[in-house]
Amino acid sequence: MLRVGLTGGIGSGKSTVARLLAERGAVVVDADKLAREVLEPGSEGLAEVVEAFGEDVLAADGTLDRAALAAKAFASEESRQTLNGITHPRIGALTAQRMAEAPEDAIVVHDIPLLVERDMAAAYHLVVVVYADTETRLGRLVGSRGMDRADAEKRIAAQATDEQRRAVADVWLDNSGEVPDVSALWDRLVAFEKNVRTRTVAGGAP
Ligand code: ATP
């Protein structure tokens, strides 16, 4: 198995690249999706969030009101840490479970927006950074997602910088223009996976 960390700033095109790799056969583990899963209705995570932040973080239908939770959780460093203390271990366990369920020869692509911010590069055999210049990203966020431009700028400024991402990138995919062709990258991942697996078997590592 090969563990690939896929990251990039908001609107860079991570999900687009993840989808292209999934079409080739990669097993994609989507960090944002797992973050939502651990707070699904009926989950222990959601029950703990309600216990910590109160019933008014729930919408009328019993699902999480994300805006209400964000308003409370980001009000202080302490409450932010309370929320992270509930969600992070659960997201970590679910990620490990999804990876363990993948076939022995899988190329697992972890689509994780905050790889750099969380200092996670060492957890992967290879880190792929998807890049798009800021104007292009703003255009996508405002154009196709209907985000407010000032809000989009604020979100970009709060994330890691391109330099910080460049420092951990094994592969740098420029997605400022046409969607990149991932054929060469896929071939490289397949070869790398074979190498990792045969070395692991030869070395008798667990
Ligand atoms: P987020 O961090 O917000 O989840 P992301 O990095 O996963 O974003 P995508 O969702 O893949 O980014 O792309 C953002 C938007 O830009 C989408 O609407 C997508 O269809 C579009 N997009 C991605 N790549 C390109 C491209 N090369 N040319 C034009 N549009 C693109």
Image (cartoon, rainbow, N blue to C red):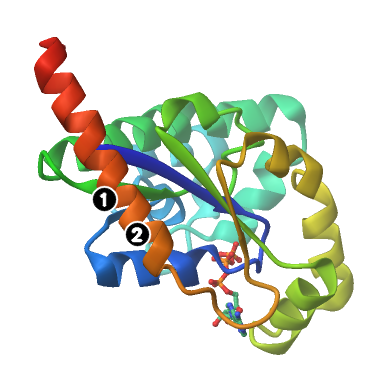
Q: Nearer the viewer, residue 98 or 52?
A: 98
Q: SS class of the residue under badge 1?
A: helix
- Residue at horizontal 46%, vertical 41%? 50
- Residue at horizontal 37%, vertical 31%? 92
Q: Nearer the viewer, residue 187 or 77?
A: 187
- Residue at horizontal 38%, vertical 72%? 20
Name the spot of residue 37 as percent of width and height, x first: 34, 52
> Which residue type carries mark 2?
Trp
Residue 100 against residue 14 in the figure, above or below: above
Q: SS class of the residue under badge 2?
A: helix
Query: Which residue is labeled 2 in the image?
Result: 186
Side (left or right) of 87 relative to 180: left
> Which residue type carries mark 1?
Val
Q: Nearer the viewer, residue 198 or 67?
A: 198
Badges 2 and 1: C-beta atoms under 8 Å apart?
yes
Query: Which residue is labeled 1 in the image?
Result: 190
Q: Is residue 117 visible?
A: yes
Name the spot of residue 17 as percent of width and height, x first: 46, 67
Residue 89's quadrant in the figure?
top left
Q: Quadrant of the N terminus?
A: top left
> Mark 2 Cα within 10 Å, few/some/many (few <14, many 20+)?
some
Q: Nearer the viewer, residue 148 or 39?
A: 148
- Residue at horizontal 80%, vertical 42%? 163
Name the spot of residue 134 as percent of width and height, x first: 82, 67
Side (left or right) of 93 relative to 144: left
Name the spot of residue 77 as percent of width and height, x first: 75, 28
The image quadrant where one finds ligand 1 is bottom right
Q: Is residue 29 visible?
A: no
Side (left or right) of 67 relative to 150: left
